[in-house]
Every structure is written in structure tokens, then in C-alpha cells.
Image: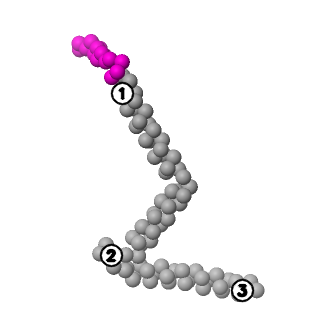
Amino acid sequence: MADKAPAKPATRSAQQIEADLAATRERLAGTIDELSFRAQPKEIVNRAVEDVKLKANDATRTPDGELNTQKLGMALGGVAAVLLTLGILRRARS
């Protein structure tokens, strides 16, 4: 197997290098701005709320966008059963 000679680096002028550095700085500044925006507590809360809304919508709606009464009924029945159980246990303790 023949060894390939290392490729010669392309010669660039100082202006080209400076232009590349300036472009890289701009990209990094944009990335830092985006990261600092995403890390703000208000934005984190907004994303979490939006995620919960989407999950609730997916859980209660059909793909057509109509209300899925069967799933909703089961969920409400489960909540009612838990609340009833808690009420019975509270009465039993007193």
C-alpha cells in the first residue's frame, strides 16, 4: 500500500484569515446569544408549559382533532376513584 503524501495546506492571505476569524466570531456570538436566551428561567417555563399543553392535547384528542371521550372518561374515572379512595381513608382515620 502506497503512502500518500500529506496534502499541502492552501496558502491564504492575512485578509482571508481575518475574514474567516470574523465570520467565526459572528457565528459564536449568535450561538452564545441563543444559548443564553434558552437558559432564561422564563423561557424554560414557557417551553415546559407548551410541552404539557401538547401532551394534554395529544392525550385527549383524536388524530382528526375531535375530543376523545373514551380516553377522557377513563382518565376522569381514575381521578374520581383516587379521590374517593382518599376520602374513605380520611374518614377511616378519624
**Three-letter code for the amino acid on which mark 1 is drawn:** Asp
> Mark 1 packing: few (<14 Cα in 10 Å), some, or many (20+)?
few
Segment colored magenta? 1-16
Q: Secondary structure at mark 2?
A: loop
User: Which mark is drawn over residue 79?
Assistant: none
Q: Residue at x 65, y 85 (%)?
A: 87
Q: Residue at x 74, y 83 (%)?
A: 93
Which circle, 1 or 3, is nearer the viewer? 1
Mark 1 to mark 3: distance in Å? Answer: 75 Å
**Percent x, y of residue 83:** 60, 82
Mark 1 to mark 2: distance in Å? Answer: 50 Å
Q: Earlier in the sequence, mark 1 or mark 2?
A: 1
**What quarter of the picture does the C terminus occupy?**
bottom right
* Quarter where residue 56 is shown: bottom left
**Percent x, y of residue 27:** 40, 37
The reply, left or right, for residue 29 in relation to residue 93 is: left
Disc 1 target residue = 20
Residue 58 vertical placement versus 48 (above, below): below
